[in-house]
Image (spheres, rainbow, N blue to C red):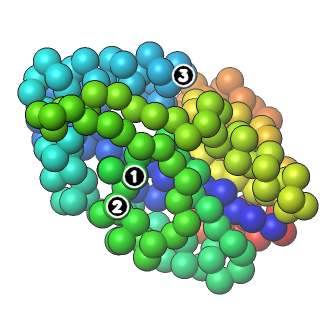
């Protein structure tokens, strides 16, 4: 069995919400927990960053001051003792580095950014459309059973593609929309759900 985890909201705080708090730009608080259309969300974010003069290095400075969610590192360690774990995230390698170090360098599949000459983020690049879902299906095609956990709209396709999908601390509206998915709210519950599905 392979365990697939989302990153933000499951192991680390939401990066964009922290950027919003530190910059005072409330519009950046919108995340994939609010907006199902990822391209629309990212275009919206990039426009705000450019208009407000926020560069990649400014976001990276915020991320360096962040820490994993309380209990996340211990949960991840316990899960890795039993199973192979892959983090499937819609974040970017340019963002994730400091957090991967703090989590003990787990395997991460995510996307990447390009910047212009002034250091502004000019575009984002998906490794593959519906990358989380495609990764799960690829693992299953190799003969693995996959159990996955996430918290947002952009995790739903991954959770549905897995042999078992688990929601972790999701918004109430997602719980209502996808009642077939198991809901957990603590790391002990999430760990137990993975172990049960082994």
Q: Is mark 1 on a helix, strand or loop?
A: helix
As drawn, the residue found furthest toward the bottom would be 81
Give percent across and percent down for residue 92. 41, 46
In terms of depth relative to the viewer, which is nearer, 124 or 34?
A: 124
Task: Identify the mark at residue 93; answer none if there is no mark.
Answer: 1
- Residue 158: name its quadrant: top right
The C terminus - image quarter = bottom right
In terms of depth relative to the viewer, which is nearer, 168 or 141?
A: 141
Task: Identify the mark at residue 36; answer none if there is no mark.
Answer: 3
Answer with left or right where residue 52 lies relative to residue 98: left
Give percent across and percent down for residue 116. 21, 32
Sequence-wise, the earlier of marks 3 and 2 is 3
73 shown above or below 24: below
Q: Mark 3 packing: few (<14 Cα in 10 Å), some, or many (20+)?
A: some
Answer with left or right where residue 65 lies relative to residue 126: left
The residue located at (9%, 27%) in the rendering is 53
Sequence-wise, the earlier of marks 1 and 3 is 3
Q: State which mark lies toward you, 1 or 3.
A: 1
Structural distance between the alpha carbons of marks 1 and 3: 22 Å
Do callouts 2 and 1 mark residues in contact (Cβ within 8 Å)? yes
Structural distance between the alpha carbons of marks 3 and 2: 25 Å
Residue at the spot of label 2: 97
Q: Mark 1 packing: few (<14 Cα in 10 Å), some, or many (20+)?
A: some
């Amino acid at each position: 069995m392979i365990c697939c985890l989302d990153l933000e909201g499951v192991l680390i705080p939401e990066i964009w919400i922290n950027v919003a708090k530190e910059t005072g730009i409330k519009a950046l608080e919108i995340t994939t927990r609010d907006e199902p259309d990822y391209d629309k969300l990212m275009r919206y974010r990039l426009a705000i960053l450019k208009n407000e003069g926020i560069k990649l290095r400014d976001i990276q400075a915020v991320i360096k001051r962040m820490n994993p969610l309380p209990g996340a590192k211990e949960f991840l360690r316990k899960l890795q003792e039993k199973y192979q774990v892959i983090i499937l995230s819609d974040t970017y390698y340019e963002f994730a580095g400091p957090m991967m170090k703090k989590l003990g360098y787990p395997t991460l599949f995510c996307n990447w950014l390009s910047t212009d000459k002034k250091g502004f983020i000019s575009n984002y690049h998906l490794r593959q459309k519906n990358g989380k879902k495609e990764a799960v299906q690829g693992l299953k095609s190799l003969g693995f059973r996959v159990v996955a956990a996430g918290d947002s709209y952009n995790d739903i396709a991954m959770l549905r593609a897995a042999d078992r999908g688990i929601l972790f601390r999701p918004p109430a509206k997602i719980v209502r929309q996808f009642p077939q998915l198991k809901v957990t709210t603590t790391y002990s519950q999430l760990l137990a759900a993975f172990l049960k599905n082994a």
